Image (spheres, helix red, strand yellow):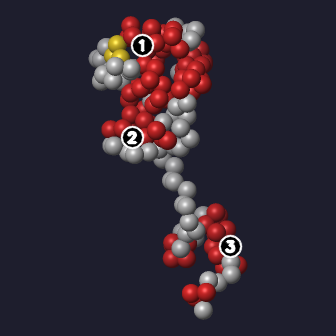
Amino acid sequence: IDPKAYQELEDFRALCLDKHGNMLNAWQNGFNIENKPGVPETVFISRCQELGFEGDGHRLFKLLRTDWSRRELKLEDFDPQTGEAIYRADPCAEAISYGGGRKATAAPKPKAPLSPLILSRCHTSHNLKRQRSKLKTAPSSPMSS
């Protein structure tokens, strides 16, 4: 992708994140207000102007659209990670959305310490080794006596 196109995409995403918090909210509340399967180019350009995007809306539409046989932009074009999360009915779709703070491929952080059994099977990770050493130095519980 050429530098100008990259910068336009980054500027557009920054505007969406500033106004809506993440790309899913931008899609639902800024671009696809009517909740249709897709957004036609004329509507997309108009919504870009409302958002305050100063670049070329027509060019941006072309950059985002992945299937050139369609005349509309879909969520899968607008934010591919979120589109896939919605398609598979992932309850974390909003968190996965660009700007939502979690990557689709990132493992969720455990809420409790990992069990010794899990730690013994995952000995290669530095973080897991560190957790294992914490478990060894932690005081034993009254139930283990």
Numbered label attached to residue 145: none
Q: Is residue 8 above or below residue 82?
A: above
- Please report whichever mark, 2 or 3, sits nearer to the chain's N-terminal start: 2
Residue at 68%, 78% in the rendered image? 138
Q: Amino acid at mark 3?
A: Lys
Q: Is residue 12 visible in the rendered structure shown here?
A: yes
Q: Is residue 6 visible in the rendered structure shown here?
A: no
Instruction: Report which quarter residue 9 is drawn in.
Output: top right
Residue at 67%, 68% in the rendered image? 130
Secondary structure type for disc 1: helix
On the image, numbered disc 2 is attached to which residue?
85
Image coordinates for residue 52, horizontal then vertical, percent: 57, 11
Q: Amino acid at mark 2?
A: Ala
The 10 Å Cα crowd at callout 2, few under 14, some 14 to 19, many 20 or more, is some
- Please report whichever mark, 1 or 3, sits nearer to the chain's N-terminal start: 1
Numbered label attached to residue 134: 3
Image coordinates for residue 20, horizontal then vertical, percent: 53, 26
Residue at 58%, 88% in the rendered image? 144
Residue 6 falls left or right of residue 25:
right
Residue 36 falls left or right of residue 31:
left
Numbered label attached to residue 44: 1
Q: CA distance from mark 2 to mark 3?
A: 35 Å
Q: Amino acid at mark 1?
A: Phe
Image coordinates for residue 87, horizontal then vertical, percent: 32, 38
Q: Is residue 107 above or below residue 31?
A: below
Instruction: Report which quarter residue 129 is drawn in.
Output: bottom right
